[in-house]
Image: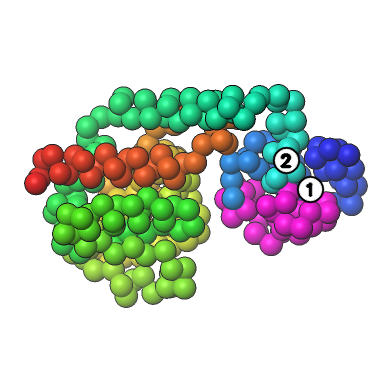
Amino acid sequence: MDFREIIEFNKPSYTKTELKIYDGIIKHLDLIERYTVMQLAAYLKVSHSAVMRFCRKLGYSGYSDFRFSYMKYAHSGAEESTNGMLQAVLALYQDEFKAFSQMDEEAFQTLADLLRAHDRIICAGFGKSSIPGRFLKYNFARLNRYISMDDDTVLINDYEKVFRKEDLVIIFSVGGYSDRITRLVAAAQRAGSDSIMITFNEKSPNLPLVTHKVVLPHAVKKKSSALLCDHIIMSLYVDLVTTYYINHYM
């Protein structure tokens, strides 16, 4: 049986929560390829463990195995050569990078101005969203500016003790809606810190709670967007902001 047949075959044995997961992913199968297990659980409004149990019920070792099986199913009809696939992926990234040329200068100036205005800067992001934050940290270390990078979930209950009113808190999050991001934003808000979120999701419920925001463009809005890494695109934004900062303030 293929991926779809396995899901349908097991449907009679699903619990109420598993039916909720089934209904959600059947309507939007491409989310399996695009989302991590945490993101999928948040989207479906179920627990991380519920998604893992669903995967194991279908005979998979975990979400990674479940996701890989879907990707084989989704792309089983493709007969592209390795070189053809490489060209396709490069073309997708090229489209994304072109979208940056359509962004207003304000999107780069906003973060550059904040970086210039604050002495104490804290970058935050969890999982792969820590990548652009670390990239920003390393870029500015070369400019003799120190930026701390915080991706420690153990400290999430203590952020209020860490943040200060004079701080700039930079938050990188693709979706901008996870519980950790919500708690992080709330802590910065209560501390009175200046905050900015960089995200792709213009409908993130946390955007109204930060003092500044940058919504990055997505040129590719189709199933093939799963071949892209949003965090690489975020890192491009970081590099462009660094270049803007150097050209205007150094």
Q: Position of residue 223 (x, y in %)?
A: 60, 30
Q: Which residues are magenta?
A: 37-66
Q: Position of residue 227 (x, y in %)?
A: 56, 35
In the picture, measured across the screen, residue 52 lies left or right of residue 148, that is right
Estimate the spatial distance between the alpha carbons at disc 2 and disc 1, rounded to whole Å. Answer: 18 Å
Amino acid type at mark 1: Leu
Amino acid type at mark 2: Tyr
Main secondary-structure element of the magenta-colored stretch: helix
* The stretch drawn in magenta includes residue 219: no
Residue at 62% over, 53% down: 37
Vertically, is 199 above or below 45?
above
In the picture, measured across the screen, residue 123 lies left or right of residue 115, that is right
Q: Position of residue 108 (x, y in %)?
A: 24, 39
Pointer 2 with pointer 1, Cβ within 8 A: no
Residue at 21% over, 62% down: 146
Asked if residue 204 can be seen in this view, the reply is no
Numbered disc 2: secondary structure: helix
Which residue in the structure is indicated by mark 2?
Answer: 70
- Specify the quadrant of the image occupied by residue 235: top left
Vertically, is 88 above or below 165?
above
Asked if residue 55 can be seen in this view, the reply is yes
In the picture, measured across the screen, residue 50 lies left or right of residue 248, that is right
Q: Between disc 2 and disc 1, whose residue precedes? A: 1
Which residue in the structure is indicated by mark 1?
Answer: 19
